[in-house]
Amino acid sequence: MANGLLETIKDRLGLNLLQYDIEEHANSIPYSLGGMSLVSIKLLIISGFLLAQFFVPDPERANQSVHYLMNQVYLGWFLRGVHFWSAEVLTVTMTLHLLRVYFTASYKSPREINWLTGVVLLLVIVNLLFTGTVLKWDQEAYEALDHFLWTVERMGIFGFPLTEAFAQGVPLLSRIYMAHISLLPLILIPILGLHLFYMKLHKVSPKPDQPEGGRTMPFSRHLAYLTRAGAGIFAVICLLALLIAPPLGEKAIIGLEVTKPPWQFVWLYALENIWVPFLIVAPVVLIMTLLAIPFVDRNKETLWKKRPIAIAFMVIVAGTIVGLIVWGSVTTMTHKM
Amino acid sequence: MPKNWLFQIFAVLLFVSFLTGKVYAHGGHKKPAVEMEEPASAVDSPYAVDGESTESSRDEEDSFPLSRPDIFADESMEHMDLQPSGAMDHKMPHVEIAKREWVSSKQKGYGTAVGITIFAGLIFGALSFKRPGE
């Protein structure tokens, strides 16, 4: 009877749709990095919703409201820590996911669309990271926004909607807050849905140099694996939030540039020191390159040893970005805009 | 007779028109003046700084650079010399650079946070040990 009821519920809720087959190697860390990123995104949405209850998106009060949350609200500091560390963990798992997909040639036919939606997701998440940095409205936040506005002002008519002049009288910080909690998530969620849909349609890519359709298992086994991985990620994020508080300064002093951006943006900060317009050129070139990869690399080989040019290219790009992050972190920059 | 009647009405109206405005304002009798209540202001806010007045808050808001469209005009983009011993040093206000810091155990709800973390760790441990559904 109980089994019959369970089957009825499964049928009515469509849970039987989760019983499709999936490649066995999906239950490994390299092939679960996307699922782990999804766990961080869920944590960001939940903690972000709670944080929004205490945030005042007004330039006069924003910084004070974050200080208030950190010092006066019960568990407020922990909540902000979970949100901050979820974003940090997401950056790491998402980057590793991208590199895994590249090195295992999973972007090749028929999975080009998965790669493209993934690049768009990366772009949206970087924007969420940036807007989140600005919201705390301290010196680092102001300087980040300062750079952003310098960039959009040079984009002419295309950058105009992103400037203060577009909606005079409305603080830009309030509009950035709207983008962070509403516009960007509204873009993120459907693209995430598409990414998952195409992953189901084209299935998990086979291991390099192996044919499509290897040994399979029910998807529910992969879900159980991801649940365990998600619990692990949540525990790590809680531990980090418990031990290390995210940076938070006092209200910004307008006109100064004394801080460095969050490490995710330090490579750009270092490039800007070499040539200021890199601030505009570098992200555009990087995104265009990522989007072009499946169309430029038509080599059918998937094993890394048989793709020397593609592998060398990514090693150089990733190595350069890591090098710039290290250089930007340890050096005092002297650029002028 | 009708003329007298009209005259009397005119005289009454003239008398009434000379009555002071205060009489009309208070319905013809004395009433204590109603004190205007200050609108709820930022002073009542938990974020308010001690001694801050609504007036000064308004003034600050009006002069806050982000409320002006030209705030990030080119001249404000000129960055200051960041060399520690530069000639600009005496002009540069001190800015405390925010860094990641160790969390103090005196933070509100620290014990609860420890509990949540241990619970999350135990859940992960139990799932790794039993591996249900895998």
Image: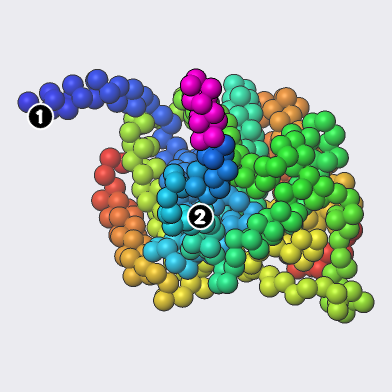
Q: Residue furthest right?
A: B87
Residue name at image x 30 percent, y 51 percent: B127
Is residue B3 part of the magenta span, yes or no?
A: yes
Residue name at image x 29 percent, y 47 percent: B131
Within 10 Å of the Cα at label 2, are there few (<14), some (14-19), or many (20+) other Cα atoms?
Answer: few
Residue name at image x 44 percent, y 57 percent: B32
Is residue B85 part of the magenta span, yes or no?
A: no
- Residue A64 located left or right of residue A201: right
Of residue B59 and residue A261, the one placed in the foreground of this image is B59
Within 10 Å of the Cα at label 1, are there few (<14), some (14-19), or many (20+) other Cα atoms?
Answer: few
- Residue B66 located left or right of residue A303: right
Residue A312 shows up from this direction: no
Placement of B69 over or under A62, stated as above or below? above
**Residue A93's spot in the image, x, y percent?**
55, 48
Report the magenta residues as a range.
Answer: B1-13
Placement of A185 over or under B40, stated as above or below? above
Q: Secondary structure at mark 2?
A: loop
- Main SS, magenta region, reads helix
Residue B82 shows up from this direction: yes
Q: Secondary structure at mark 1?
A: helix
